[in-house]
Amino acid sequence: MIRVQPLLAFFILVSVSFSAALILGQERDRARIEDRYKWNLADIYPSVATWRQEKEKIAAEIPKMKTFTGKLGSSAKVLADALDTMTRLDKELSRLYVYSTMLSDQDTRASEPQGMRQEMQTLYAGFGAQIAFIAPELLKVGSAKIDRFIATEPRLKTYTFFLHDALRRAPHTLSDVEEKLLADTQPLAASGQNVFEILSNADFPYPTVTLSDGRKLKIDQAGFIEARALPNRKDREVGMSAFFQAMGTFSRTFGTTMNANIQQELLFAKARKYPTTLELSLDGPNIPVSVYTRLIDGVNKNIATFHRYLRLRKRMMNVTDQLHYYDLYAPLVASVNLKYTPEDAQKHVLAALAPLGPDYVSVIQRAFNERWIDLLPTEGKRSGAYSDGGAYDVHPYMLINYQGQYNDVSTLAHELGHTMQSYFSNKTQPFALANYPTFVAEVASTFNEALLIDYMLGQIKDETVRLSLLGNYLENIKGTVFRQAQFAEFEMKVHEMGVKGQPITGEALAKLYLDITKRYYGHDQSVVIVDDYIAHEWSYVPHFYRNFYVYQYATSFTAAEALEAKVIAGDPAAKTRYLTFLAAGGSKYPIELLKDAGVDMTTDEPLDLTIRKMNRVMDEMEAILAKR
Ligand SMILES: [Zn+2]
């Protein structure tokens, strides 16, 4: 993968919901759903015909970029013209792309929108090829001349961050011939991942088990998620052991696909003169390696708090002997079935987000009233939920599959967090600086979930419901902070084996994974028994092929917790700083953006605040349980 500043502004934030339960015999026919529950894509283009005209116009303009080749250093005006043209085309492409994807997502069965989406992917690839000369050419122009240009041409002010970022990576940018050679390896570079995906999604012989009620369940990815949450312990054990033992029979193959992935990263690190693959990955967004290692060290230092949670889980589940790893996804509280109509959800979300002030709340009102949201599940609609801020000149949109559970209310608050960051960044920043970096992308969304749960806990007095909500919160920390830090530690050690030239085999990876998992779950202290077949869990996690990605789930969560704690404490300066962050887009590097927002990711503070809150939540839960 070539890590140049991504100029293509399309990215979608997805949070997948696994909830399969259907709500209230809801109407599924899109045509019969009231308009107010459907997004209004006509805000982007009044019709597909207009989209097509606009697309043809932009497609005809793309070759203009080529006329700037070899001329970026000729004058400040030419450089500004080139960057203005590139940015304008990128902005319009993004608008075209967003329309095609959302039209396709609202009914994935329709073939015309799918075709439109494919046309856009082709157009984007062509645009990418047309602008590929820019970064290497800027390096040839050199920083002295570029700084002189910036000082004399006011239009270049907007691009200062982009220009300096491209120059920063000069020591890791190669000659034209070498860059071309690296680019040509791209189709090969994902081979490990591609083989893994085909094997696990299509060809893997997933086993079938018989459950305690006689039902046969195929333990593929979906069956596994169902089995591990079943109320009967024996069923959970049968499902989980069957799944991981089946993975184990392909251990050599999975080890080989992972080795291929590590070797390609090592090749790129070496070619680009980075001592490790970790440094290669973190240098793009300019994140210090210490942010990564500090997370892992901090989570290990606080592992006793995690064990306290696991013991509480055991108590709540009434497990009298040993808690096992296969018990960890079973429901914590016997079902609390709260239902929220869409109107309830709006009311709660508005009240919960009120601490962010009237400006913030008034935009949320617009999202509800001006049809920014496609709320209800309908026939053929894409599953899950996302927010998309890619239509820069219009407004962000949200796709939700609302089914009336607390989790759905929380998803709405979550996606509104993304939407508000897009809205304020798009409104405040020029297009070139509006797109916020991945490292901070889940902060605003998680922040809103935290505000919602605090608000709901202020409203709900029923202790069973409180236990359920508090338990939900802890499960979230388990999955987002502890499990992702555990993954991040495993991943770091696998890459270290690669850097040291040690063999990366299925057997070695299984041993490493089992050792780390036993430590995190307190196997030796009998907190949770981690059975030997858990060694193969690593092999089904697709994220390990997106090198050094998952740690950001944990850092986003702790950053959001820390910021929410400061805002909710009532300090008006904390609120102002946070709102400034929401409007800052990608105008700085992620660590600086968060520092301005009020949290320093190069310190232990964010994790410490998260751990403190976790302990407060457990204090309350134990107090409720003690009364029973
Ligand atoms: Zn999200």
Image (spheres, rainbow, N blue to C red):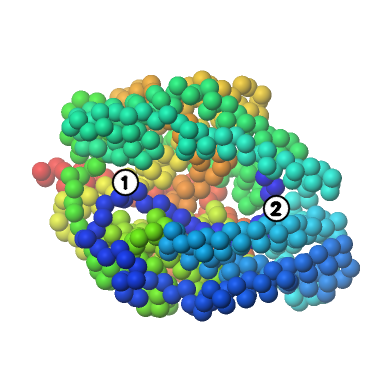
Based on the displayed image, in which of its 4 quarters is residue 447 positioned?
bottom left
Q: Which residue was labeled with disc 2?
A: 4
* Residue 308 on image: x %, y %: 30, 37
Residue 69 image point, x, y percent: 84, 63
Name which quarter of the figure residue 238 lies in: top left
Examine the image and state in which quarter residue 162 appears.
bottom right
Q: In this view, does 227 lie above or below 350?
A: above
What residue does disc 1 label? 474
Marks 1 and 2, the one that precedes in the sequence: 2
Is residue 37 left or right of 584 when viewed as pictured? left
Q: How crowded is mark 1: few (under 14 residues within 10 Å), some or many (20 or more)?
A: many
Judge by depth and name the residue closer to the eye, 596 or 399: 399
> In the rendered view of the protein, which quadrant contains the N terminus?
top right
Name the residue at 35% across, 48% down: 18
Residue 580 appears in the figure = no
| Residue 60 appears in the figure | yes
- Residue 287: horizontal and vertical position, in percent? 61, 49
Residue drawn at the location 42% of the way across and 62% of the way down? 107
**Label 2, residues with CA under 10 Å away: few <14, some 14-19, many ≥20:** some
Question: Marks 1 and 2, Cα distance to the nearest angstrom?
Answer: 38 Å
